[in-house]
Amino acid sequence: MTQIARSAVFIGFDSLCRQHGLNPHALLQQCQLDPLLLRRQDLYLPYARFAQVLSLAAAQAECPSFGLQLSEYHDYLVLGPFGLLLAQAESFADVLKLTQQYVHLHAQGIALQARLDRQHLQVEYRLQLQENVDQRQLLELGLGVVHRSMQSLFGEQWQLRQLLIRHACQGQPSDYQRFFNCPVLFEQPLTALVADPATATLRPLEQRQQLKSHLLQQYAQRHQLVDDLATRIRFVLQSILSTGEASLPVVARLLDKHPRSLQQALHAQGLNFRRLLDEVRYAEARQQLRQSNQSITDLALHLGYADETAFSRAFKRWSGQAPQPWRLAARAAH
């Protein structure tokens, strides 16, 4: 199975390429990718192709630290639905658990494993791509994104003791040490971030203002900057649907409201949270059934259902048909 990633992985790529005198559109085309990926964050592409683009850009720019430089444009807010979940975490251990569980929503083929003892906390970072491509730039980008995301979530509490990288240093060791603010050791048996054991119990900084600003920015980009409560709830639901956490308490936190206050506001407008969730799921289901070839099981999980049966039962209630017959009829009509 080919691992895929959200096109949000390209955030900052256009700007960084132009800083180095590169044509980002030409780079994508050389790797058989549509330049539209640079303008949309909600599309998908083979993750191995992204690795190829990074390697090509680094070579043409003669910039060995290209992947690391690209990570400076990223933090947890570019990670999509699962990034929003990280902001709700109770501790570093919770952040790690959520990342292990949901990172595939942003990019498939990333694996993290933590080892904790009295001396240190070690978080191993692995790429598991089936395609045989140079992964060094992609790996360094990933390490940079993890580091910057932890800085955003934990502030000055986040301090690495050292960083271990399997491959040889591609640029100047001092650049890596400056970025990660710790000793960086290359040609190691594994790639891992190493911190003090107390890191596991760190509590994230308050993120409500950052989340609010992020959601407002997303509204503006989609021309939906309105005060309509139902529209705002639908937008948040669309953002977190695939996490399986599309509940009233989670939506309330992301809107900086108490769940009871949100429930009362909905009731005052004659609205129902469950009905809004069904509307968002039904709209997304129809779009995916028309436009994508993903299996019904994968679509069910994407919509936040526990299994295909629950989704099929709901879809038949909405449309009068099971998902697969509806898909065939919709495509035949076009």
Image (cartoon, rainbow, N blue to C red):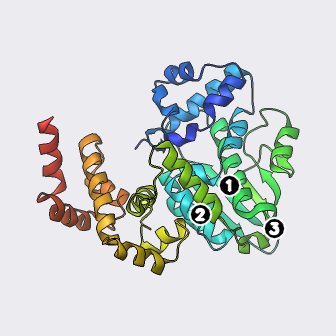
Residue name at image x 34 percent, y 68 percent: 306
Pointer 3 or 1: first along the chain: 1
Say which quarter of the image contains residue 159: bottom right
Q: Which residue is mark 3?
A: 196
How far is the residue under mark 2 from the one under mark 3?
Answer: 21 Å
Residue 107 in sight from this viewpoint: no
Q: Position of residue 75 (x, y in %)?
A: 65, 50
- 205 or 273, which lies in front? 273
Q: Position of residue 214 (x, y in %)?
A: 58, 53
Residue name at image x 72 percent, y 71 percent: 200
Q: Which residue is mark 2?
A: 86
**Residue type indicated by callout 1:** Ser
Disc number lying in front (3 or 1): 1
Q: Which mark is residue 205?
A: none
Disc number lying in front (2 or 3): 2
Q: Which residue is mark 1?
A: 149
Crowding around mark 3 (Cα neighbors within 10 Å: few <14, some 14 to 19, many 20+) is some
Residue name at image x 44 percent, y 48 percent: 224
Crowding around mark 2 (Cα neighbors within 10 Å: few <14, some 14 to 19, many 20+) is many
Pointer 2 or 3: first along the chain: 2
How far is the residue under mark 1 from the one under mark 2?
Answer: 9 Å
